[in-house]
Image (tube, rainbow, N blue to C red):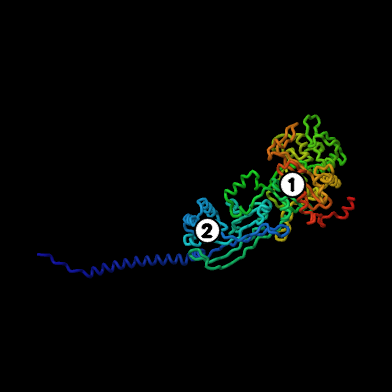
Amino acid sequence: MPQPIPLKDHEKDARLVRQRALVGSIVVLVLVLVLIARMYYLQVIQYDHHATLSENNRVHVQPIPPSRGLVFDRTGRILADNRPSFSLTVTRERTGNLAQVLDTLVESLGMTEEDRELFEKRVLQGRRPFEPVPVLFELTEEQIALVAVNQFRLPGVEVSAQLVRHYPYREHFAHSVGYVGRINEQELKTLDPVDYSGTHHIGKTGIEKFYEAELHGKVGYEEVETNARGRVLRVLKHTDPKPGADLVLTLDLGLQQAAEAALGDHRGAVVALQPATGEVLAMVSLPSYDPNLFVTGISFKDYSMLRDSIDRPLYNRVLRGLYPPGSTIKPMMAIAGLDAGAVTRTSRVFDPGFYQLPNVDHKYRNWNRRGDGWVELETAIMRSNDTYFYDLAHKLGIDRMHTYMTRFGIGQHVSLDMNEESSGLMPSRQWKRTRYKQAWYPGETVILGIGQGYMQTTPLQLAQACALMATRGKWIRPHLAHSIDGRSPIDPNPVPDIQLRDPNFWEYARRGMEMVVHSPRGTAKRVGDTAAYRIAGKSGTAQVVGIKQGERYERGKLAERHRDHALFIAFAPVDNPQIAVAVMVENGESGSGVAAPIVKKVMDAWLLDANGKLKTEYAMPVEAEVSRR
C-alpha cells in the first residue's frame, strides 16, 4: 500500500527564508557600512591630500622661458639675435606609450632610425614633469602638416613656436661671440632647475658662455587648467619672464671684415686693441666656421668634418693658439734690460753674425749671417739683431727675465671676459725643475732672448704687450664687452701698471720700434714707405721645426706646415696711439714680408678716412708735433 505524501511545512519554510534574509541583510549592511567608512576616510580624513592630487591633475604650472639678450657690435649692428622657429615638442607624461608614439612620429615624417634614437635621448633627458621637450627644430610647412594630419596618433606631441638663436654674420664672429647649444646631461647637474625651466639652450663658447648669466634672463610661469588629454583650457595665472640683458661689444664689424680680408687665405690670427681702453676692436681666427650649425644640434657628419679638418676651424687661434713670440718680444726685452740696469741706451755689442757664451763652442746664429757690426739698443730693435738680444738675455738671467716678461702679461691670463684664453708659458727655473726635473741651463736663457725655446704666447698676449708699449705700461685688460644692459664691465682684479725707474726707457724702446718701420734699414721699411701715419712695430719669425747647428733654413726642403710662423706687432699713430695690432700667420715665414702688410691694412681700415687721409680725431696732438720738431 503506497506511503502517504507528507504535507508541506509552510511555517518551517517561512522561518528559513526569514533567517536567510536576515543574514543577507546583515551582510549588505556590513558592506554598506564598510563603503560608508571608506568614503568617509577618503572624503573627510584624506580630503586635503586628494583635493591636491585632483587639482594637480587639472592645474599645471608651465614655465615661460625668457628671451635671450641680443648681442651688438660697437656701432649697433646685431651679431646675435633670436629668430622665431617652429619646433616639435614631446611631453613624456602625456604620450602614454612613448615608444609607440616615437615610432609613429618617425614613420609619419619619413625619418630614420638614427633620428628616432636622437628623439628618444632628448625626451628621456632629465627635465621637470609635464615639461615639453623639443626634439626637432625649424620644421618645414610639410612637416607641420604631417604632424597635424597624424595628431590623433601622436598624444603628447605638439608643434610650438620658439625663439632660436641666430648669428647673421655666421663665421665672422664665431670665435668671439661664440654660440649657444642644447643643454646636456652634465650641464643639467650644475644648473638651477628652476631658473632654467623651459630653457633648452645655454652658451657654449665665447661671449655667449662668459655672459650666460646676464644674457639668459629670468624664467616666467603660467598656471593653466587642462582637460584629461592634457590640452590647455584656460590660463589661471601669468607671471611674465624677464628678458636677458642686451650686450654691446667693443668689436667693429667693418674692422673685423677688413682684418679677415687682409689675412686672406692664410691660416692665422689677427687681434686689434684700443690701447687706452683695452677694447678689442677686431678678433679674427681663420679658418672659421658657421656657429648656426651648433644651435639646434649639428649633424654627426658636419661635426666630423669640422673636428677632423687639418686646418682646425674650431680652434680659436687668438686665445688658444700657443706660438713662440720670436723677435716680437725684443722691445719688451729692451725695457727689461734698461730697467734692470743690464744695459744702457748706448751699450754696444759687436755682431759677427753669431753669439757665443763664454768658454762655449756652440754658436747662436743671427738671422743676418754677415752680422751688423757694432749695434746699440735702438739699432738692435730696428735691425732685429739676434746677437744683441742673446747677450742681453745672458746679462739679465732667467730670473729677472721671468719677472719682467710676466709684468708684460707673458705666461698670464690677460683678458677680462674671455674664459677660453690660454695662459701661455713664461718658463722659469722652478717650472723646469717641476716639469722636467732638470736644472736650468744658460743656453736656454740665451734663446729666450729672441722669443724661442720654451716661451709660448697667444696672439692676444702679444697684442696686449704691444698695447703696454703704446701706453707706456698702463695696464688695462683686453675685453670684448663694451656695456651690459647699459653698464660698463668692471675689472675685479686690476693689474698694476709697469713702473720704470726712468720713464725715458719707454721712449728708447718705442723709438727702436718706430725705426723698424720708418728707417731705411728697418726690417719693415716697405710698410712704412706707404704709410700715411707713423707706425711703431716689430716683426718676428717663430720656428716650427728646429735647424741643426751649421745648417740653413731652406723652405724648399720643408713641408708647408713645417715652415716658420710669421708675426708682427705694431701700434699707431706713434704719438697718439689709437690701435695696437698683433698678427700671426701660420707657416707664413716672414714677419716683415707677410705679417706686417696685414697689420698695415688693418690699421688703415681703422685710422684712414674715405680719401686715404688720417682721420682728424686721430691726428697728432699739437704739443706732440712741436716736440717732434
Secondary structure category for the residue under label 1: strand
Which of the pair 552/274 is nearer the observer?
552
Residue 12 location, x and y as percent? 23, 68
Q: Does 64 sit left or right of 53 as displayed?
A: right
Q: Quadrant of residue 565?
A: top right
Mark 1 or mark 2, whichever is nearer to me? 1
User: Mark 1 vs mark 2: which is more N-terminal?
Assistant: 2
Which of the pair 78/60 is nearer the observer?
78
- Give the number of the disc on residue 623: none
Secondary structure category for the residue under label 2: strand
Amino acid at dot 1? Val
- Residue 9 in view (yes/no): yes
Say above or below: 326 vs 250: above
Q: Quadrant of residue 16?
A: bottom left
Residue 92 location, x and y as percent? 51, 57
The N terminus lies in which quarter of the figure?
bottom left
The residue positioned 71% from the left and 43% from the top of the image is 586
Q: Which residue is mark 1?
A: 583
The residue positioned 73% from the left and 46% from the top of the image is 459
Which of the pair 54/5 is nearer the observer?
54
Amino acid at dot 2? Val
Give the CA distance from mark 1 to mark 2: 49 Å
Tag 2: Cα neighbours inside 10 Å, few (<14), some, or many (≥20)?
many
Q: Which residue is mark 2?
A: 90
